[in-house]
Image (cartoon, rainbow, N blue to C red):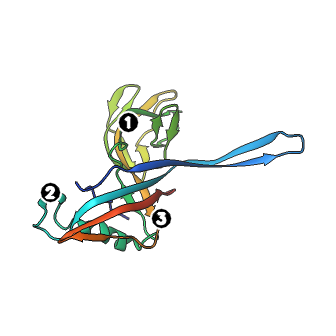
Amino acid sequence: MTLPTFPTLPGQTFATKSPITAGIVAEHDSGRTVRTALYQGLYEFEVGFEALASDAASNPGLGAQSLQAVMGLYLQCGGSYGAFLYVDPNDNAATNQTIATGDGATTQFTFLRSIGAGADSDFYVTGVTGVAVNGVAVSNWSLIAPNLLAFTSPPASSATIAASFTYAFVCRFLDDSQDFENFMQNLWAAKRIKFRSVRQ
C-alpha cells in the first residue's frame, strides 16, 4: 500500500517537532525505583501555512491550488484515521549510516539512523542511493518497505553494513477537525496543523 505524502509548499511556516518517549516508574517501599523504557523514536509535529492559494493563477508563488492539496490530504486520511508520510525538511536523509554488523547468516536488516548518541529505526525509507559492506559498495540487496534492507546472500560475520538513504515519518493527524481561514480573495491560512508519527 502506498501512503500519501504531506505536501511541500512555499507557504509553510517553521515547524515544531517534539520527541516522544514513554516509560514506567515503579516505586518500592525501600525508596528505590525500577524504571522500564516502553518506546522511543516517535515525534509530534506542528506545522502552519500562513498562505494557501485556492485557485491556480492568482498567487503562483504559493503553488496552484495549494489549499486543495492540504485540505485534500486531510480529507483523504479521514482526519485522524488514515496515515500519511511527512518529509521533515531538516531530518530526511542519512549518508553512509552504519545500520548493522553481519553474522554470516542474517540477510535482512532494519535501517536505522543515528541522532547524537541515540539511534532510531521508526521511519519509512523512501529511497536508497548506496549500500556498502566493510566500506565496499555492493548491489546484491533490495529494499523491503517500510524499512528493511534485504541481501540475496548474508554479509560475512563481523562485516559492517552501511547505507545512504532518504526517509519520511509515517504520521496521523491528531484532530478530527481542522481550521482553514479565508483571509483574502483566493488566499487561505491553516496556522496550526498537528500530527504525530506512529509505529509501523
Residue type for callout 2? Gly
**Residue 30 image point, x, y percent:** 89, 40
Nearer mark to the viewer, of 3 and 2: 2
Query: Could you tell me how far apart the alpha carbons at marks 3 and 1 are, in whole angstroms?
Result: 33 Å
What element does badge 1 sit on?
A: strand
Residue type for callout 1? Ala
Q: Horizontally, is 64 left or right of 170 in the view?
A: left
**Up-down: is 168 above or below 95?**
below
- Residue identified by numbered label 2: 61
Query: Could you tell me how far apart the alpha carbons at marks 2 and 1 are, in whole angstroms?
Result: 36 Å
Quarter of the rendering containing residue 31: top right
Q: Are marks 3 and 1 in contact (CB under 8 Å)?
A: no
Q: Earlier in the sequence, mark 2 or mark 1?
A: 2
What element does badge 2 sit on?
A: helix
Q: Are marks 2 and 1 in contact (CB under 8 Å)?
A: no
Q: Name the residue: 13% across, 68% down.
A: 56
- Residue identified by numbered label 3: 174
Mark 2 neighbour density, 10 Å: few (under 14) some (14–19) many (20 or more): few
- Residue 54 visible, this angle: no
**Up-down: is 132 above or below 82?**
above
Nearer mark to the viewer, of 2 and 1: 2
Q: Horizontally, is 56 left or right of 127 in the view?
A: left
Q: Name the residue: 89% across, 45% down.
A: 29
Q: Name the residue: 45% across, 73% down.
A: 176
Q: Name the residue: 24% across, 61% down.
A: 51
Q: Residue 163: which disc?
A: 1
